[in-house]
Amino acid sequence: MNQEPSKTYTRNLKSDNELKNCVHAGLQQILNRIPHIRGLHLDQANEYCKHQFAAVVTYPLNGQTKKKSRDETDEQPGTSKQEEPAKKKARKEGKSRPKDDTSFRKYGPKNIPKILEPLILQHLQNEELFKENLDLCEECLNLISNSLARRTWQKYGSALSLWQKFAKDKNVKGFPALAFLCWCRKNTTVKSTTIKGYLSALRKIKFLLGFRSKKGGKTIEKIILRGMENIECRNEKQPKKIIPMDLKIMSRIKNGLRKTNLKNCTKKSVWTLNVVAFWGLLRLGEVLPGKADSFDKTSVLLWKDIEFSNEKVTLHLRQPKVRTEQSKTVVLYKLSASRFCPVKQLKKLRKTQMKNGIWGKNMPVFLRSSGGSLTKTTFLKNTNCALKKEDPNAGNLQGKSFRSGIPTLLKKSEPENMEKNLKILGRWKSSAYRCYIRNLDPGNRPVFLQTAETLLTNFFAQERNPGSESM
């Protein structure tokens, strides 16, 4: 009875090969259920089934695996590109952008090297005033740090470090520069150009530490002032672009004033000042008060300071910026174009103010309808508002726009005796008028164009005839 089942089982199997296939299929099903295991042999799988909870052992491949060359582009699953850091990936793809690092400034309060800072601080504390006022001493150290760039301070630190090694090695005192050069040549691999820079840096360090130079040179006050300038430049805003006034802009202002809600007397004052300031190259501070409800009769242009005649009008400025006889008088002549004529516009303004009952011999010339004075702020605000009515994309005019107008226009045409004429018109004592010329064409333009055109012609000729250069 015990042998019957075995006989029946043996009889149902066709061959030994079928038995092996069944066993292999059963083990393969077991392997499919086991995660993260691939490439195990049958005996290894059988061993795993006996000890399912034993530690997983990884078996090395037989033989050394051949490393793939860079030319092979096929990628295996699970490559490192999928797990690449985001910063590195962004840098490769060109998506990274530089950031402004506030801790790394060209000029800053912490640029002095640690090896040099205590020496400078000790020298400053020798001053009696700095001993009693540590806040002033700290501010002085801050300005000294801002007087030089970070890389310059780093060179100073490297020079002092090398000098200290030399002084410790040879037990020297004073400043034996020749011995230092020879020591550097014998004991270091520093190049001669670097040593030359170190020697210059050591002399500057001596000066910072209070040693007097035989040649004089910069004083400590100049270093402090240089530090102040660097701090101011760091915090300085971008200067506004100055638009020079011309007749086209004035025409737009004239048309724009008609569209504003300003009263008639205010419009007349704004337009007349535009005309007079343009032709007279006026500084607005020479004719306008600082406040609308009060003025200084010793510095503001009053009606009694204007002298009329048939063909001209003379303005006597009380406090011009340049104190010469020529600068105190502005003479404007009658022009054929009525709306741009300073003589006619001043006469119309006087008539309008008389009609409104606000004219007075001892009153400022440019008044509003309310009786208050035009100030620089209100004048520029109303002028720009009128300009925007005609040209919404126009830039803002400034006080220097009137000083820059005629010099810029004359520079474009370059008539004879331009410099002499500009000095007379604008009451300039020196060549300072050049500062008011906008869009200045460089003087070396013909030389530059001639040189550039020659180089470009030769370049294109060589491209057309590649063998001409070798021939």
Image (tube, grey):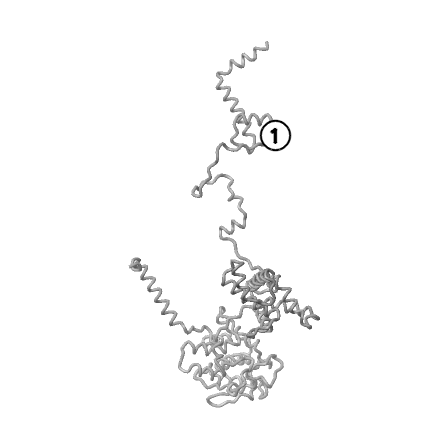
Q: Position of residue 255 (x, y in %)?
A: 48, 75
Residue 21 appearing in the image = yes
Label 1: element kind: loop
Q: Position of residue 229 (x, y in %)?
A: 57, 70
- Hey, which quadrant is residue 112 in on the image? bottom right
Is residue 82 positioned above or below 131 on the image?
Answer: above
Q: At x 44% / y 73%, what residue is drawn?
A: 440
- Identity of the residue furthest to the right in this view: 132
Is residue 143 positioned above or below 31 on the image?
Answer: below
Question: In which quadrant will I find the N terminus?
Answer: top right
Closer to us: 287 or 407 = 407
Closer to us: 155 or 159 = 159
Q: Position of residue 334 (x, y in %)?
A: 45, 86
Is 309 displayed left or right of 447 in the figure?
right
- Identity of the residue furthest to the top in this view: 1
Q: At x 40% / y 77%, what residue is drawn?
A: 413
Closer to us: 234 or 282 = 234
Q: At x 45% / y 72%, what residue is drawn?
A: 439
- Hey, which quadrant is residue 99 in on the image? bottom right
Residue 102 appearing in the image = no
- Callout 1, which amino acid? Ala
Q: Position of residue 333 (x, y in %)?
A: 46, 86
The residue pinned by badge 1 equals 54
Closer to us: 183 or 404 = 183
- Identity of the residue furthest to the bottom in this view: 309
Task: Count numbered badges in the picture.
Answer: 1
- Hey, which quadrant is residue 44 in on the image? top right
